[in-house]
Image (cartoon, rainbow, N blue to C red):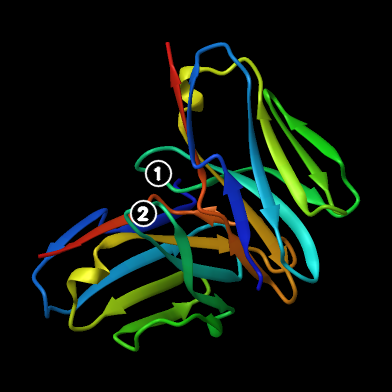
Amino acid sequence: DTAVSQTPKYLVTQMGNDKSIKCEQNLGHDTMYWYKQDSKKFLKIMFSYNNKELIINETVPNRFSPKSPDKAHLNLHINSLELGDSAVYFCASSQQGRNEQFFGPGTRLTVL
Amino acid sequence: KNQVEQSPQSLIILEGKNCTLQCNYTVSPFSNLRWYKQDTGRGPVSLTIMTFSENTKSNGRYTATLDADTKQSSLHITASQLSDSASYICVAFYGNNRLAFGKGNQVVVIP
């Protein structure tokens, strides 16, 4: 009964490939997020969706495209992967009006 | 600029000792502030939330303080345990559901 789950946990791929990371939450939250954590452990928000609508889009290359088929899912698709995309990507969710975010276990992406 | 600065970047402490982590924020308008603990290989987990009117709050051996005038917060760990080894991240919430992350304090507790 994991609250926020991500798949896969590890992803190793070649430069130029397209890959997706999936996220699901079973907390009934209406807001979901994607974060990127670099090698220096700095967490940076990428996107935020509320009720399937994009509400935060930080300065992220348009190779990154989030997709929210429903409130419980927020997937991240990355086109034409680059070496600099290597990082740990965290999904999180929260209930609107309450800013405590619940994070998933992370997906470690390595681009070769 | 809306940002959060944390210090020290990293520290090593002996098991059983206390330590204090600092967080300075410059966000506006300030809403509240959270401390998260991130164990290696895991996602961050919320430890405590500090609102504008709260000065201190405890969660077990963790005690957070907030000084809204000086825009500073601290996290004090009492009688540290090996399981306290982690990164502690300060997050300030402001404006319309915006947030600013600190870079974290890396704590290593040694026996």
Could you tell me which chain the residue with mark 2 belongs to? A
Residue depicted at x 68% and y 29%? B76
Three-letter code, disc 2: Gly
Q: Which residue is mark 1?
A: B42
Q: Furthest-bottom residue in view?
A: A62
Residue B53 locus on image (x, y percent): 91, 51
Please say if the residues under marks 2 and 1 sit with CB atoms less than 8 Å apart: yes
Where does residue A44 sit, x and y in percent of width and height? 47, 65
**Residue B5 point in image, percent of width and height:** 60, 54
* Residue A80 shows in the view: yes
Quarter of the image with the C terminus of chain A is: bottom left
The residue sitting at 49% across, 51% down in the picture is A3
Q: Is residue B50 left or right of residue B83?
A: right
Residue extending farthest to the right is: B53
Task: Identify whether B60 is placed above or below A33.
Answer: above
- Looking at the rendered structure, the secondary structure element under dot 1 is loop
Name the image quarter holding residue B94.
Answer: bottom right
Visible residue check, residue A28:
no
Letter of the chain that mark 1 sits on in the rendering: B
Q: Nearer the viewer, residue A39 or B81?
A: A39
According to the picture, the residue beneath numbered tag 2 turns out to be A106
Is A62 drawn above or below residue A21 in the view shown? Answer: below
Side (left or right) of B32 relative to B13: right
Number of marks present in the image shown: 2
Residue at 24 percent of width and 64 percent of height: A86
B8 lies above or below A60: above
Q: CA distance from mark 2 to mark 1?
A: 7 Å
Residue at 77% of width from left, 70% of height from top? B28
Q: Residues within 10 Å of mark 2 (few under 14, many from 20)?
A: many
Dot 1 alpha-carbon crowd within 10 angstroms: few under 14, some 14 to 19, many 20 or more: some
